[in-house]
Image (cartoon, rainbow, N blue to C red):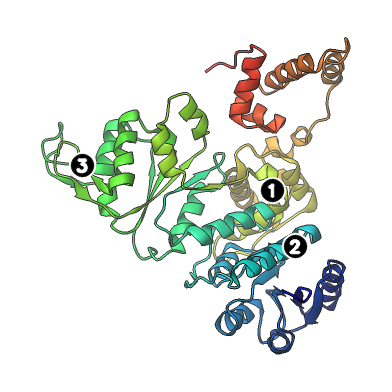
Amino acid sequence: MSHPPRIIVVDDDPVTCDLLCEVFAREGFATLFAQSGEEALRAVEEFRPDVLVSDIRMKTRLDGLMLLDHLRRDHPSLPVILMTAFGSIETAIRAVKDGAFDYVSKPFDIDALVATVRRALDMRRASGVARAEEAGESESPSELVGRTPTMLEVYKLIARVSDAPTAVLITGESGTGKELVARAIHTHSARRDQPFVPVNCGALTETLLESELFGHVKGAFTGAISNKRGIFELAGHGTVFLDEVSEMSPNLQVKLLRVLQEREVIPVGGSAPVRVNARIIAASNRDLEELVERGAFRHDLFFRLNVIQIALPPLRQRREDIPLLVTHFLRKHTPPGRCVPTIAPPALDCLLRYVWPGNVRELENTIERAVTLDRDGTITVEDLPPRISAPTSAPSQPSTDTADKLTALFADLPSLAEMERRYLLYVLEATGGNRKRAAEILRINRKTLYRMAARHRLELGS
């Protein structure tokens, strides 16, 4: 581009237009704004922009998604970045699949938005063509709710992997919504009309799980009175979701690896392989990399499953989504014909303070309980469980004893190496020996934690 980069900002809010035009002008971009989709189409023809940034919801005939449709048809090489204050998985998936370069949430981080525009410019310089993907949009509402940046990244990953045949590994603590992500991938894929079959690998014995997944032939074991087709075969061209895949025995891990590599299964007691076509999505609330290091999970299976990884954040790391989730669950659990209750501000404050060890699942159960107990149309603190409504549910301040321990770390002016050893011991003690949590606090990965412990001759245990 010999000329300064040209940016068109599209938003029916003049304040947003002025702000973004000023920001982009400071970056050395030539900027122009439009306050409707129709005006934007005319501006594109006259201004010939290098990037277009548009709001999705506008009170004009052409909203952001409709504008995107026009631009993908008439100007397929123009990168389009969409913004919205009403983020959802449906709009994110449609935006990405319809060819938007990126999708950002309002209120946006100015630096992050500028960085996104620069990435779009770099892509345009490199190829001259923005990637456009074709796909339909599912009309069914999703149970995935959230507008925080981490959730928007999850939505975009779902959009990008849904039509690929590759395996997906979903990680996250219990209750974060791993099965919901798997269902969203299936629902927004070309496999949506085929079965989605969830299997909890930790809920069945090894023998039963093997028979369920791979099938068996008559006489394979006591009670096998006829041939039985397994889940991988019955799923056809659909999706098999293996929840808690870390609980699979070594024997079943070998069989699953064969499914991924050869696309075939051998029924229990059989000898002839059966071709299968189902996509595999796996999930685990345990650290599979750590299990691989300990020899408890096959490294070759891990690499086959981990082609694409989607990491779900715990609820405590996306507290801004709690009011949105509360509204969603209030509507979901209110019986038909009854007005949806509101939530009193003190009750919402309790929900925002609580640490949510059970994540979104615990929040949903809490709201379902509150709706059941409600009698006057307003959820109050009294409708919440004591563990949540009690003042102790708020994050506590460091105690005097803790402060004394921290001070003692420095008291004799130790060397940097000794200081590292002491702090590592302190963190391990504070987390009760939980290596995953210790690594998170130290902002290091698990391998670095093990190396650090070995360097200081500390035993982390098995």
x, y percent for residue 153: 62, 55
- Disc 2 marks which amino acid? Leu
> What residue is drawn where x is 79% and y is 58%?
111
Q: Which mark, residue 113?
A: 2
- Disc 3 marks which amino acid? Ile
Name the mark nearer the viewer: 1 or 3.
Answer: 3
The local secondary structure at tag 1 comes to loop
x, y percent for residue 248: 37, 33
Label 2 packing within 10 angstroms: few (<14), some (14-19), many (20+): many
Q: Which residue is mark 1?
A: 318
The quarter of the displayed image where residue 438 is located: top right
Looking at the rendered structure, the number of numbered marks drawn on it comes to: 3
User: Looking at the image, is mark 1 or mark 3 earlier in the sequence?
Assistant: 3
Residue ranking furthest to the front = 2
Whether residue 434 is visible, yes or no, is: no
- Disc 1 marks which amino acid? Arg
Q: Which mark, residue 195?
A: none
> What residue is drawn where x is 79% and y is 48%?
346
x, y percent for residue 335: 55, 60
Whether residue 110 is visible, yes or no, is: yes
Name the mark nearer the viewer: 3 or 2.
Answer: 2
x, y percent for residue 288: 49, 34
Q: Is residue 52 above or below residue 74?
A: above
User: Looking at the image, is mark 2 or mark 1 earlier in the sequence?
Assistant: 2
Of residues 272 and 338, the one nearer the viewer is 272
Query: Is 356 left or right of 187, judged from the image as shown?
Result: right
The local secondary structure at tag 2 comes to helix
Label 1 packing within 10 angstroms: few (<14), some (14-19), many (20+): some
Q: Label 3 to label 2, Cα distance in Å? A: 51 Å
Q: Which mark, residue 266?
A: 3
Label 3 packing within 10 angstroms: few (<14), some (14-19), many (20+): some
User: Looking at the image, is mark 3 or mark 2 earlier in the sequence?
Assistant: 2
